Amino acid sequence: MTKETRTANNFIKNIVEKDVADGKHAGKVHTRFPPEPNGFLHVGHAKSICLNFGLAQSYAQGACNLRFDDTNPEKEEQTYIDAIKKDVEWLGFSWEGEVRYASEYFPQLFDFALELIGKGKAYVCSLTADQASEYRGTLKEAGKNSPFRERSIEENLDLFQRMRAGEFPDGAHVLRAKIDMSSPNMNMRDPILYRIRHIEHHQTGKAWCVYPMYDFTHPISDALEGITHSLCTLEFEGHRPLYDWVLDNITIPCHPQQIEFARLNLNYTVTSKRKLKRLVDEKRVDGWDDPRMPTIAGMRRRGFTPESIRSFCEAIGVTRSEGVVDVSMLEFAIREDLNERAPRAMCVLRPIKLTLSNYPEDKVEALSVPVHPNFPEMGERTVYWRKDLLIDQEDFAEEPPKKWKRLAPGGSVRMRGGYVITCEEVVKDAAGNVTEIIASYDDKTLGVNPVGYKASGVIHWISSVENVDLTVRLYDRLFTDESPDSGKAAEDFVQLINPDSLQVLANAKGEMSLANIAATLPYQFEREGYFCVDSSSSEGKLVYNRTVTLRDTWEKQGN
Ligand code: ATP
Ligand code: MG
């Protein structure tokens, strides 16, 4: 995919470009990313972050705010605020000025509500929740006016002030916009603007017991911040008339343009904070940053790079048509990035002894191999050849299938970066399991294949002495089902968890270079995949996570 086609299908970029060319908003581009701090950010949010911050970055007069949409204190927490800030920064973006909070605007929002009441455009309604939903009507049937709709401005002002003063319990009254109970758009049927909640807020403490609704808060927050383009996902399309109504009916100089785009849906993946929270709360995963989670924190721990996530977001584009993106595109993006930058190392995940019958007992050869096959400037690393080696159990078969390219009785393979060996015999335990392979090596084969020599393949290996102990976690997709997030499976999605999504190999052995190079580097373990050090690692106890396999193994299995 070329750079051109990647940007061509971002329709919002085209709109913004035209606006800038036309001098609309005085040539300014000011966007915002407005998460609700009620969970960790996921890959869908990454799309929105890359779009909002990315757009702002591409203009000299561009800026993007980070604003917490914190009007629902029940579900919100400081932990989430901290995690979200960290994730946005990690993705490589910086916000304009200080972090903003919708809750900072509570005083202004309250005044705008008073203005609406004063203009006869909002009223205090005292229907119970059940009554209110009955009055609301249905998609086919118009709603009915609330009996409280014609309260006088004075009574409304008085009641609203007393709601704010804490005189009424939760649910006793709400403030509603006076729009149109027969509108075909349910959002316009006198929507609630304020409700009473006697609850402490993580930012404002006990200062408020009435909280503004999202549909009232959002347009005003955007306008107060001078946002030019307010980008959101398609489910808000039906809220746009209300967004505009609010701004048209209060005294505020700025009127941002709301533009909706299709949310990111990924197959084999759940992208809903509520469902991700359930996985965490039910301990089906090891927290929000479990490397199997599609959260940004999970992907970071899994070994994804910010570059790979950004290039994925660019590749999927921005359109208005709902679709499902194949998760293999995300895996492609990280492979492509790591293939370039990851140093190589040999690591034997499931070791089995391999003894060279014709190699001296006390001899050790230090062999140099390149850190990266394509970049000599990355230097050389040392691997140690001796009589006692280890190879992976999966690289040996007593009865090999056809076209076997690894080691088998009587067969020869090249040991990567080392010599060609030939399997002579195997040693078994009482149960008949192979416990050791005896092989001979050919001392004329280091780095060369003598004429007529035939080694069937190349396998990786490690010295049984010069190595570091590793625990390796092999991660696979968290769900076996292609659409765990939709349809009949919607609430049963936990039943679709892949039982093999985590495999822990506690006896892996890695080459010595793993002990020397900065632990934060992602590695390619040759023939196995890309790996990164897990955050739970400590000195002498290295844990590596498999970020992704070298090839798309799901494709092959026909999954
Ligand atoms: P969720 O659906 O996971 O609960 P949300 O929409 O409630 O997410 P917010 O914190 O309100 O989460 O989202 C912040 C911003 O990210 C919003 O502008 C929202 O439209 C956008 N966003 C959320 N999910 C996606 C997604 N899957 N694809 C693209 N943008 C998304
Ligand atoms: Mg939301």
Image (cartoon, grey):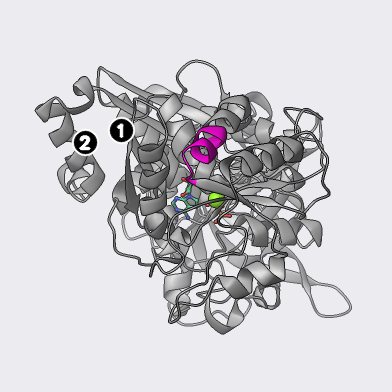
Task: Name the spot of residue 69 as percent of width and height, x first.
Answer: 58, 38
- The residue carrying pointer 1 sits among few (fewer than 14), some (14 to 19) or many (20 or more) residues within 10 Å by Cα, namely many
The one of 226 and 332 positioned closer to us in this rendering: 226
**SS under mark 1:** helix
Disc 2: which residue: 16
Q: Residue 372 at what x, y percent from top left?
A: 42, 35
Is 305 included in the stretch rendered in magenta?
A: no
* Badge 2 vs badge 1, beta-carbon distance below 8 Å: yes
Residue 30 vertical placement versus 418 (above, below) = above
Residue 323: name its quadrant: bottom left
Q: Nearer the viewer, residue 33 or 470?
A: 33
Residue kind at label 2, given as amino acid type:
Val
Q: Quadrant of residue 466?
A: top right
Q: Work out whether 522 lies above or below 291.
A: above
Say whether residue 120 is left or right of residue 435.
Answer: left
Say what amino acid the circle numbered 1 marks: Leu
Identify the magenta region.
Answer: 113-121
Calculate the distance from the C-alpha at mark 2 to the C-alpha at mark 1: 8 Å
Residue 118 magenta: yes
Asked whether residue 325 is in view, the answer is: yes
What residue is pinned by disc 1? 55
Disc number placed over residue 416 in the picture, else none: none
Quadrant of residue 19 within the rendered picture: top left
- Image location (x, y in percent) of residue 261: 34, 53
For marks 2 and 1 on the same chain, the one whose residue lies earlier in the sequence:
2
Q: Is label 2 in a helix, a strand or a loop?
A: helix
